[in-house]
Amino acid sequence: MARDLTQLELLQELAGVAEENVNRHLSMAKEWHPHDYVPWDEGRNFAALGGDDWDLEQSQLDEVARAAMITNLLTEDNLPSYHREIADNFSRDGAWGTWVGRWTAEENRHGIVMRDYLVVTRAVDPVALERARMTHMTNGFASPAEMGGEGGSFLHSVSYVTFQELATRVSHRNTGKACNDPIADRMLQRIAADENLHMIFYRNMCGAALDLAPDQALESITQVLERFEMPGAGMPDFRRNGVLMAKHGIYDLRQHLEEVVQPVLRKWRIFERTDFTARGEATRERLGEFLEKLDSQASRFEEQRDRMLAREAAKREKSAAAAV
Ligand SMILES: [Fe+2]
Ligand SMILES: [Fe+2]
């Protein structure tokens, strides 16, 4: 059996591809400014400066849009944790270092624009938001990538962020629609376009790692998918908000499978490749079984959700009828 490549060997072998992809990213990325996406004329002082403090009635967003906005923003806020993970696993030399710095600066822009929008429009409670940010950042984030093996941490990181960037893109897009505000929608579309470019960088890197070390890379990809979670654990109300988002189609298992996992696996041609040894073939079989399981979980969730939404609609109709 061929020996697994070490972390250092992977980084050295892939340095050229990293450079190509950093250059590709820089040529594709568009400059944009957070202040252009915020309706500043809706802003006014809070009580500390003689105005009024926040009240739920001021919010133009419904409960689902608020939960999604907060979850997405806190995820962006936790950037120092992700920066540390990526910087540790990618090295800070040459193109790797350029990428880590650039990516961090772009992600920070997302948090800036979303917070400005939410505070200026009084869409969410700024005190609760700040407290949640403090808790979430203090807890930090450790990727589920602590899963051994030579070169494992680079491969785990790069496959995790490929799926995560795409998941974030889907979540931002659907949050934009749920806000019912063209300004919020435009802002989140802008962010989602960045997330897509990030995903492409990581997907290309992981694709190159698959070509270089097929068995080893597939093992990481499979483990990451089996344990995939959005990076929100440690966030106040993470479960509650996650359920709300899944229930209302912002990010659910079906979207995870069909809009995130499958398109990436297709791009890597996982099920058509002929470069796996017996070890890789066995992993691929495990991955196939996992995808089937995910598909039936998604169907079960959809059935439950349909029943739950129907019950809620019936309840609303009943109370509307009673009120007449
Ligand atoms: Fe982002
Ligand atoms: Fe991103």
Image: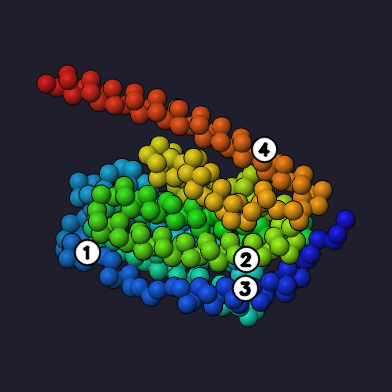
- Residue indicated by mark 3: 18
Neighbor class of circle 4 (other Cα within 10 Å; few <14, some 14-19, many 20+) is few
Of the residues under marks 3 and 1, which one precedes in the sequence?
3
Q: Is the residue indicated by label 3 positioned so its CB lies within 8 Å of ligand 2?
A: no
Say what secondary structure mark 1 lies in. loop
Of the residues under marks 4 and 2, which one precedes in the sequence?
2
Residue shown at 47%/44% (left/top)? 255
**Tag 2: amino acid:** Met
State whether residue 90 is above or below residue 176.
Answer: below
**Tag 3: amino acid:** Ala
Of the residues under marks 4 and 3, which one precedes in the sequence?
3
Neighbor class of circle 2 (other Cα within 10 Å; few <14, some 14-19, many 20+) is many
> Which image quarter: residue 227?
top right
**Tag 1: amino acid:** Pro
Say what secondary structure mark 4 lies in. helix
- Residue indicated by mark 4: 289
Of the residues under marks 1 and 2, which one precedes in the sequence?
1
Residue 164 horizontal/vertical position (percent): 53, 55
- Residue indicated by mark 2: 205
| Quadrant in the picture for the C terminus | top left
Mark in front: 3 vs 1:
3
Say what secondary structure mark 2 lies in. helix
Residue shown at 64%/69% (left/top)? 90
**What is the spatial separation of the Cα atoms under label 3 and label 2, in whole angstroms?**
7 Å
> Which image quarter: residue 30?
bottom left
| Quadrant in the picture for the N terminus | bottom right
- Residue indicated by mark 1: 39
Neighbor class of circle 3 (other Cα within 10 Å; few <14, some 14-19, many 20+) is many
Residue 73 horizontal/vertical position (percent): 40, 57
Is residue 254 toward the left or the right of residue 209 in the image?
left
**What is the spatial separation of the Cα atoms under label 3 and label 1, in whole angstroms?**
38 Å
